[in-house]
């Protein structure tokens, strides 16, 4: 027998090994594709069966009807609250004060003075919170123009927030001490005080975070430096 050139023999062995490896790879790929197709067919059958079952499920129809009824009820409640001033921060005259604090469950009332800068700062925070806490009504009353209720509720220092639940004054925050040691504080500081009083309730967590409820002012102070401003006219006795 004629001896084969070692180099040719080596090359032939490499070719055979490569060919076998390629055939094995093709077989593995084919098996993977067949398994994947079988899995896809099975999942599609399950989906078809589930959808058919759901479409004819009386329990699902009942849940759907209950959900629609709940949404309609919530919408009607929101419209009713909106008609009496919810969602806005409104000034109320002395003659309308009693109706405002007794017509809804939770009310935040700011007794203010038109010339006090601190009252104006608090107005900005409350305007933001009125839009977030729709179920609570936010109002303000000019203390000099409402002498009867100012005396009756013993409002002696401004700004003064009085919190009402079911028509009863349950708590109050006087001045800025409850929010910060200075006039520069975020809306969240006022919000925390309102939550503590129970006159507002933390919104339920949804798909987004609470940032959507409030504009940028909530996360930063709404106060800007005012040249020559003095706080001597605020947090003083109001007689």
Image (cartoon, rainbow, N blue to C red):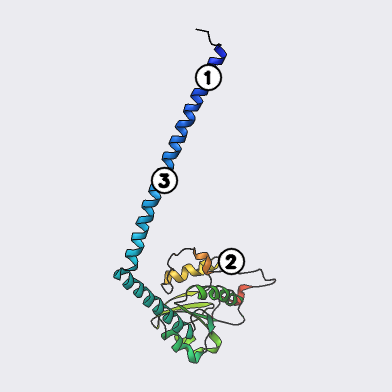
Label ID, residue 216: 2
Query: Residue 221 vs residue 78: left or right?
Result: right
Q: Which residue is mark 3?
A: 36
Residue at horizontal 38 percent and vertical 47 percent from the top: 38
Q: Is residue 8 above or below residue 216?
A: above
Give whichever of discs 2 and 3 has the lower sequence position: 3
Residue at horizontal 61 percent and vertical 76 percent from the top: 117
Q: Is residue 125 visible?
A: yes
* Quarter of the figure with residue 144: bottom right
Q: Are marks 2 and 3 in contact (CB under 8 Å)?
A: no
- Tell which of 228 and 170 is nearer to you: 170
Q: Residues within 10 Å of mark 3 (few under 14, many from 20)?
A: few
Q: Give the image location of residue 125, x and y in percent.
A: 55, 72
- Tell which of 72 and 96 is nearer to you: 72
Secondary structure type for disc 3: helix
Q: Give the image location of residue 212, x and y in percent.
A: 53, 67
Q: Nearer the viewer, mark 2 or mark 3?
A: 3
Q: Nearer the viewer, mark 1 or mark 3?
A: 1
User: Farthest residue toward the front?
Assistant: 1
Secondary structure type for disc 2: helix
Q: Which residue is mark 1?
A: 12
Q: Give the image location of residue 228, x and y in percent.
A: 69, 72
Q: Residues within 10 Å of mark 1 (few under 14, many from 20)?
A: few
Q: Is residue 167 above or below residue 228?
A: below
Label ID, residue 174: none
Give whichever of discs 1 and 3 has the lower sequence position: 1
- Tell which of 231 and 212 is nearer to you: 212
User: Farthest residue toward the right?
Assistant: 227
Secondary structure type for disc 1: helix
Residue at horizontal 39 percent and vertical 55 percent from the top: 44
* Quarter of the figure with residue 8: top right
Give whichever of discs 2 and 1 has the lower sequence position: 1
């Amino acid at each position: 027998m004629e001896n084969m050139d070692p180099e040719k023999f080596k090359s032939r062995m490499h070719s055979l090994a490569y060919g076998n490896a390629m055939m094995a790879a093709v077989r593995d790929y084919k098996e993977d594709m067949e398994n994947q197709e079988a899995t896809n067919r099975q999942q599609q059958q399950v989906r078809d069966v589930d959808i058919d079952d759901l479409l004819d499920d009386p329990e699902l129809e009942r849940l759907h009807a209950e959900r629609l009824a709940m949404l309609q009820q919530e919408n009607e409640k929101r419209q009713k609250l909106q008609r009496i001033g919810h969602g806005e921060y409104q000034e109320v005259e002395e003659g309308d004060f009693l109706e405002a604090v007794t017509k809804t469950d939770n009310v935040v009332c700011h007794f203010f003075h038109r010339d006090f800068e601190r009252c104006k700062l608090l107005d900005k925070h409350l305007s933001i919170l009125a839009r977030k806490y729709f179920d609570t009504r936010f109002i303000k009353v000019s203390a000099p123009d409402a002498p009867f209720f100012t005396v009756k509720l013993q409002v002696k220092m401004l700004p003064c927030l009085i919190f009402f639940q079911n028509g009863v004054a349950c708590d109050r925050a006087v001045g800025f001490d409850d929010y910060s040691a200075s006039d520069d504080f975020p809306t969240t500081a006022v919000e925390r005080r309102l939550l503590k009083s129970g006159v507002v309730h933390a919104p339920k967590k949804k798909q987004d975070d609470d940032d959507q409820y409030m504009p940028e002012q909530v996360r930063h102070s709404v106060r800007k430096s005012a040249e020559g401003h003095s706080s001597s006219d605020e947090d003083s006795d109001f007689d």
